[in-house]
Amino acid sequence: MPKSSKGKIVVGLSGGVDSAVAALLLKQQGYEVIGLFMKNWEGDDTDEYCSSRQDLVDAAAVADVIGIEFEAINFAAEYQDRVFAEFLREYQAGRTPNPDVLCNSEIKFKSFLDHAMAMGAEKIATGHYAQVRQFLGEWQLLKAEDGTKDQSYFLHRLNQQQLSKSLFPLGQLYKRDVRKIAAEAGLPNHARKDSTGICFIGERPFREFLSRYIPKQPGEIRVLGTDQVIGAHEGLTYFTIGQREGLGIGGVKNTPEAPWFVAEKDMKHNILYVVQGHNHPALFSQCLVANSLSWISDKPPHTHWVYAAKTRYRQADAACQIERISANDCEVIFAVPQWAVTPGQSVVIYESCVCLGGGIITANLTPDA
């Protein structure tokens, strides 16, 4: 294959349509493109919920149609040590982690990046919906043009060196256009369904998966602010703030007919506290504290400036200020109380379309706290 004057780019081919179109576009732009399939999980490859074998087949088929080199590499050991072990530690501590955030910073933009550089690549590329640019000598991470698909939230822990070596070819495209490009190019996965959920869990029941690694520890379900016991749980690990499904609470005497939501987890006494109604005050937080801070520019944002923040991926931007910031943690105050702010999840800070970084939520405070 002739070498391109535009340089060598290694694309992370997952088997999905997004990474396939990313590779296709770079090839059309004249780059020397190599597709690299990352195998990050091998705990139960024969399980009906694991799609890694089909993913590999689809990725190889895409590379063949596009006409690029292709190889597969196993990062399962690195994933186990850097991502999954931390995932389990967080759940055991009663928090709800987001392993996809850690996977990006530790595997896709570290192990994969290092491997690509060793192959002689100038940069790597993925099918993420985000944008990167250099502004006043600094690399910035921007939201994608398609706000419904923007994935900058998952990329907020990337640093200057990682961003300087990264391309996001889909950053200015809408998903409908990506599928159209794939179909017109005859890519075999153009109509493939988007993957959902945590990568190593897939579509399987979450509680069943987690119980393989964290033993059940039954306890009481109580109404928040009272000693009233209205049910039993199998383990606080299996629940998250704001959760409605799977509580097993039927009609409760002397209470109105309204859905129950998880409001608090007492890890010391193994008690799950619940409240009724989506808009119960206990489900809202005016303030949060976050640690494990990571700022893309290597410099923290200003305190008391008005920014926007997300405390979960699908959340709309919420106006906020950073009240206090140190090397270890920061305090974020919201203009309007936010629903189900969950320890273990990431709070990600934005200035307009620019992602500044963020941290891991450790505590939240209700409006009256």
Image (cartoon, rainbow, N blue to C red):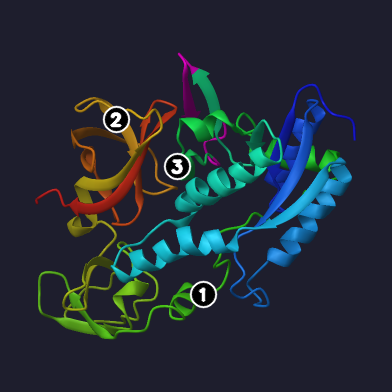
Residue wearing tag 1:
205
Q: Amino acid at mark 3?
A: Tyr
Residue 132 showing in the rendered view? yes
Q: Residue at x 35, y 67 (%)?
A: 89
Q: Residue at x 39, y 41 (%)?
A: 316
**Picture layout, residue 71 above or below residue 24:** below
**Which label lies toward us, 1 or 3?**
3
The kind of secondary structure element at disc 3 is helix
145 inside magenta stretch:
yes
Residue wearing tag 2:
300
Residue 138 is left or right of residue 360, and the answer is right
The image position of residue 17, as x and y in percent, is 72, 47
The image position of residue 82, as x and y in percent, is 46, 58
Residue ranking furthest to the top:
136
The kind of secondary structure element at disc 1 is loop
Q: Amino acid at mark 1?
A: Pro
The segment highlighted magenta reads 135-149
Residue wearing tag 3:
153
Closer to the chain start, of discs 1 and 3, is 3
Residue 67 is left or right of residue 360, and the answer is right
Closer to the chain start, of discs 2 and 3, is 3
Viewer-closest of 271 and 242: 271
Q: Quadrant of residue 223?
A: bottom left
**Picture layout, residue 277 above or below residue 132:** below
Q: Residue at x 43, y 80 (%)?
A: 211
The image position of residue 360, as x and y in percent, is 32, 49
**Picture layout, residue 15 above or below residue 240:** above
Q: CA distance from mark 2 to mark 3?
A: 17 Å
